[in-house]
Image (cartoon, helix red, strand yellow):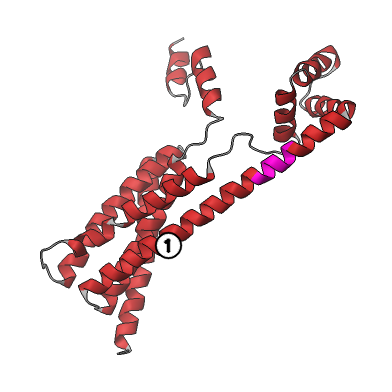
Amino acid sequence: MLSFFKRKHTLDHDHSPEGIQERLQSKTEHSYLGDFVLGAIDGCVTTFAVVAGVAGAGLAKHVAIILGAANLLADGFSMAAGVYQKAKSDKDVLAKARRMEEKHIDVVPEGEREEIRQIYAAKGFEGNILEEIVKVITSNRQRWIDTMLKDEFGLQVEMPSPLRSAVTVFWAFCMIGMIPLLPYLWPFNFGPQITFLYSCIMTGIAFCIIGVVKGRVVHKSVLFSGLETLFVGGVAATLAYLVGVWLRSLNIS
C-alpha cells in the first residue's frame, strides 16, 4: 500500500475525476507560453550575437545600440509575421476541412457514418458497442464533424489566435532581446570590454531563465534545459564574436 502512494505522488498528473476533467478541458486551449519562449530565445540569441559581433570587431558603443535596436524591430517583426502566417494558414486548412465534412454529412450521411464506424472499429470496438458509439457521435452534428477532423485528418480542432500568437512572439522577442543591449544603454562609461562583460553576464542569466521556463513547458529537466539554452546562445555569440575579430583583422574601412 505504501509503495502505491509513493508511485502516485511521483506521477505528473492528478488522476482524481476532477483533475482528469480539468486536464482534458485544458488540452483544448492553446498555451501562448510556448510562443513567448520561442520569441524570447530567438530575440536574446540574435541580439546578443549582434552585440558580440560588434565587440569582436572593436566597433563603437553606439554601433551596438543601432544594430541591436534594428535587429529587435526588424527580426522581431519578421518572426511575428511568420508565426502569424503559420497560425492563419493552419486555421484556413481547418476551416476548409470543416466545410468539406459539413457538405459530406449533408450529401452522403451514411458514408460519413461508415467512416466513424471504421475509425472506431480500428480502435478495437465491435458489435453493439461499436454501433452505440456511432449512434452517439453522429447524433450531434458538431461532435460528428469534430471527430472526423481529429480522427480522419489528424487536425487540431482548437487553434490559437494568429494575432495573439504574433503579438506574444514580438513582445517576448523585443523584451528579452533588449537584455544584451542594456549595459550599452547605461549612462556610465565602463569601457568597451567591461560593458561587453556585463552584457555577457546579463545575457547568460537570461538564457538560463528562458531555458528553465522552456523546460517547464516541455516537461524536461529545468537544469538541462537551462544549460542547453545557455550553450546554444553561447555558440551563436562566439561565432559572431569570431567573425567580428576576423573582419577587424582585415582592416576594412
Circle 1 sits in a helix, a strand or a loop, which is it? helix
- Residue occupying image coordinates x 54% and y 24%: 25
- Is 38 one of the magenta-colored residues? no
Tell me the kind of residue under disc 1.
Answer: Asp
Res. 51 image quadrant? bottom left
Above or below residue 246? Residue 73 is: above
Of residue 224 and residue 31, the one placed in the foreground of this image is 31
- Residue occupying image coordinates x 46% and y 45%: 35
- Is 93 one of the magenta-colored residues? yes
Question: Could you say where residue 69 lies in the image, as x and y percent from the top left?
Answer: 32, 64
- Residue occupying image coordinates x 43% and y 18%: 6
Predominant SS of the magenta segment? helix
Left or right: where 203 falls relative to 24:
left
Camera sees residue 235: no
- Residue occupying image coordinates x 29% and y 51%: 206
Question: Could you say where residue 146 lies in the image, as x and y percent from the top left?
Answer: 70, 29
Question: Could you say where residue 17 lies in the image, as x and y percent from the top left?
Answer: 53, 13
Task: Name the residue tied to disc 1.
Answer: 75
Question: Could you say where residue 8 lies in the image, as x and y percent from the top left?
Answer: 46, 18
Quadrant of the image containing the C terminus: bottom left
Of residue 163 and residue 233, the one placed in the foreground of this image is 163
Res. 126 image quadrant? top right
Res. 100 image quadrant? top right
Q: Which residues are magenta?
A: 92-98
The furthest residue to the top: 1
Above or below residue 53? Residue 158 is: above
Q: How many marks?
A: 1
Of residue 31 and residue 69, the one placed in the foreground of this image is 69
Left or right: where 164 falls relative to 243:
right
Q: Residues within 10 Å of mark 1 (few under 14, many from 20)?
A: some
